Image: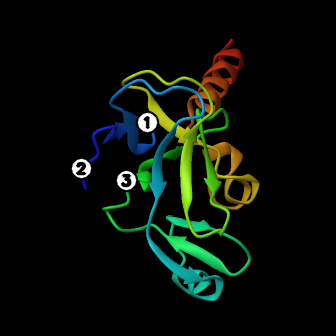
Amino acid sequence: MKNENVQTKKSQSGLGLFALRDFKKGEMIIEYTGEKITEEEANKRGGKYLFELNDKWTIDGKGRENLARYINHSCKPNCYPELDDKEEHVYIYTKRNIKTGEELTYNYGKFYFNEIIGKDNCKCIGCLEKKTKTEKIERQ
């Protein structure tokens, strides 16, 4: 799916979603789309593109038309997800001004970070910088 504001391309975490223009703080960038499924069905399917809406419903965003699925995790994100009032749609907003070419990221949350990623496997810029500093100190 073509989007004039964002582009999928290679990042340090595999594929990522990047800004094709400048965004102002608080601006909505994209909707996280996909099939709305029950929590029970989500548990059966597993997968890494599941976005929990509430205790009953989840969006399975695995389809390639869902460009928002390419937004990677960051411990210091430049975006955040927000549900609409009916908890049926997830929109991604900017936490700060974003420049053209910058990778879009949001924090996937404590459960996903602890259970799926794990602190030693995080590939966000902040964690990679910490690892590099630690490795340099250990080599000295």
For marks 3 and 1 on the same chain, the one whose residue lies earlier in the sequence: 1
Calculate the distance from the C-alpha at mark 2 to the C-alpha at mark 3. 9 Å
> Residues at badges 3 and 1 in contact (C-beta under 8 Å)?
no
Q: Quadrant of residue 115?
A: bottom right
For the residue pair 130 and 42, the one nearer the viewer reads as: 42
Residue pointed to by mark 1: 12
Q: Which mark is residue 1?
A: none
Give amino acid for label 2.
Lys
Q: Could one spot residue 71 in this view of the protein?
A: yes
Labels 2 and 3: the sequence-earlier one: 2
Q: Earlier in the sequence, mark 2 or mark 1?
A: 2
Circle 2 crowding by C-alpha within 10 Å: few under 14, some 14–19, many from 20:
few
Q: Amino acid at mark 3?
A: Leu
Name the residue furthest left.
2
Name the residue beneath numbered marker 2: 2
In the image: residue 39, left or right of residue 98: right
- Which quadrant holds the N terminus? bottom left
Q: CA distance from mark 3 to mark 1?
A: 17 Å
Residue 73 seen:
no
Picture quarter with the C terminus = top right
Is the residue 112 above or below the residue 125 in the image? below
Residue drawn at the location 41% of the way across and 23% of the way down = 22
Amino acid at pointer 1 = Gln
Q: Position of residue 66 (x, y in %)?
A: 38, 60
Circle on res. 67: 3
| SS under mark 2 | loop
Residue, x 68% and y 63% (percent of image)? 85
**Residue 116 horizontal/vertical position (percent):** 64, 60
